[in-house]
Image (tube, rainbow, N blue to C red):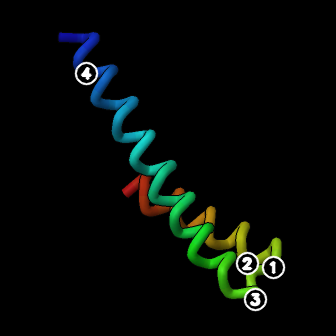
Amino acid sequence: MLVEAELQQERMQRLRAEHMLSNVERECRVPFVVPALFQAFRRISELERNV
């Protein structure tokens, strides 16, 4: 059971990372993303994960 729980956790982390990457890729298509905006976006995504 522990292995299954760890596997599920890894899957969730992968899905979050893929979601974040897809958001970044979508934002990068429009050339207004600057490093500060990207950092703010990452922090908001991290806050979402922790809720």
The residue carrying mark 3 is: 32
Alpha-carbon neighbours of circle 4 within 10 Å: few (<14), some, or many (≥20)? few
* N-terminal label among 4 and 2: 4
Name the image quarter holding the N terminus: top left
Q: Is disc 2 in contact with disc 3, using a CB cutoff of under 8 Å?
A: yes
Q: CA distance from mark 3 to mark 4?
A: 40 Å
Callout 4–callout 2 Cβ contact below 8 Å: no
**Pointers 2 and 1 in contact (C-beta within 8 Å):** yes
The residue wearing badge 1 is: 34
Three-letter amino acid code at the position of disc 3: Phe
Q: Is residue 6 left or right of residue 35?
A: left
Q: Considering only order in the chain, which callout, 4 or 3, is on the residue closer to the N terminus? A: 4
Q: Position of residue 46 (x, y in %)?
A: 53, 57
Residue 30 relative to residue 16: left or right: right
Q: Which residue is mark 2?
A: 37
Three-letter code for the amino acid on which mark 4 is drawn: Ala
Q: Earlier in the sequence, mark 2 or mark 3?
A: 3
SS at mark 2 in the image? helix
Tell me residue 28's x, y (percent): 68, 76
N-term-proximal mark, 1 vs 4: 4
- Between marks 2 and 1, how big is the CA–CA gap? 5 Å
